[in-house]
Amino acid sequence: MDTMDTDFFVAWLEEAARLVHRDRDRLTELDAAIGDADHGTNLDRGFAEVTKALAEWPPASPVQVLTSAGATLIRRVGGASGPLYGSVFRQMAKTLRAPVTLAGFTAAFEEGVVAVERLGKAALGDKTMVDALAPAARALALAVRDGVGVREAFAQAARAAEEGAKATIPMQARKGRASYLGERSIGHEDPGAASSALLMAALATAAT
Ligand code: ADP
Ligand code: MG
């Protein structure tokens, strides 16, 4: 697989929806510890709508998949994470050019992560989804530089996101609801970082 077509992007989001649904309770429990216990239900509802919309209005291009997903997430996921995830996909849609190569995907994904950082005013180490998304973007950029194939690149990005999510456990939250807890936010994995790791795991699966 050298380029990614519309079906690939649909498969990515369908797998993301499946993983978010499977892990809904875990994500909500993580949010119960340092937030308001709605992250799993929010995202599950949002991604179920994403797959429904993609089935009802079949997209004709990767850009249409991402535009549809971004709009649905912004509309249907409440809280902080809806607009943030929505902006990842919408910014990717703005940046992406056909045919989608690994380099093109990576450039768009990097722009998507920058959009989250800008909207959330969050940086690496603030204990947010950025702590999973930014390492994934970096892993992709290194894979492009080293000429790694698509499958291996996405597998590396998924591992980087998972490690990034686990690395939020000892952090003190500086953004979002969890920051209100101050030092009491230490010792818990950030729910948004955990769900971002699922998005990247879905990407790796879609490429296999
Ligand atoms: P809410 O906090 O409004 O209930 P969710 O529970 O759906 O929204 O999502 C919480 C997650 O959103 C956090 O775990 C964190 O990863 C992410 N988040 C919250 N605020 C920010 C921010 N300012 N920048 C980046 N990510 C954020
Ligand atoms: Mg919440």
Image (cartoon, rainbow, N blue to C red):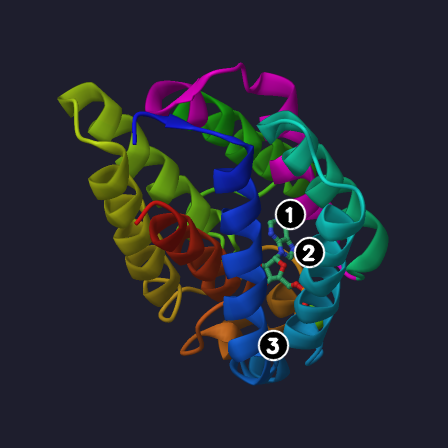
Per the image, label 3 sits on a secondary structure element best described as helix
Q: Residue shown at 26%/49% (left/top)?
A: 155
- Mark carried by residue 51: 2
Is ligand 2 within 8 Å of the beta carbon of the residue shown at mark 3?
Answer: yes
Give me the C-alpha separation between circle 1 and circle 3. Answer: 16 Å
Give me the C-alpha separation between circle 2 and circle 3. Answer: 24 Å
Quarter holding the N terminus is top left
Q: Which residue is mark 1?
A: 85
Relative placement, left or right, of 127 versus 147 is right
Q: Which residue is mark 3?
A: 31
| Mark 1 surroundings within 10 Å by alpha-carbon count, few (fewer than 14), some (14 through 19), many (20 or more) | many
Does 83 appear in magenta?
A: yes
| Mark 3 surroundings within 10 Å by alpha-carbon count, few (fewer than 14), some (14 through 19), many (20 or more) | many
Relative placement, left or right, of 43 versus 100 is right
Q: Do tag 1 and tag 3 residues touch (Cβ < 8 Å)?
A: no
Give the residue furthest to the right: 75
Q: Position of residue 163 (x, y in %)?
A: 28, 59
Relative placement, left or right, of 70 versus 26 is right
Determine the image quadrant of residue 37: bottom right
What's under tag 2, amino acid-wise?
Answer: Thr
Per the image, label 1 sits on a secondary structure element best described as helix
What's under tag 1, amino acid-wise?
Answer: Tyr
Q: Quadrant of ligand 1?
A: bottom right
What's under tag 3, amino acid-wise?
Answer: Asp
Tag nearer the camera, 2 or 3:
2
Determine the image quadrant of residue 29: bottom right
Dot 2 or dot 3, earlier in sequence: 3
Q: Nearer the viewer, residue 49 or 108?
A: 49
Q: Position of residue 31 (x, y in %)?
A: 60, 77
Per the image, label 2 sits on a secondary structure element best described as helix
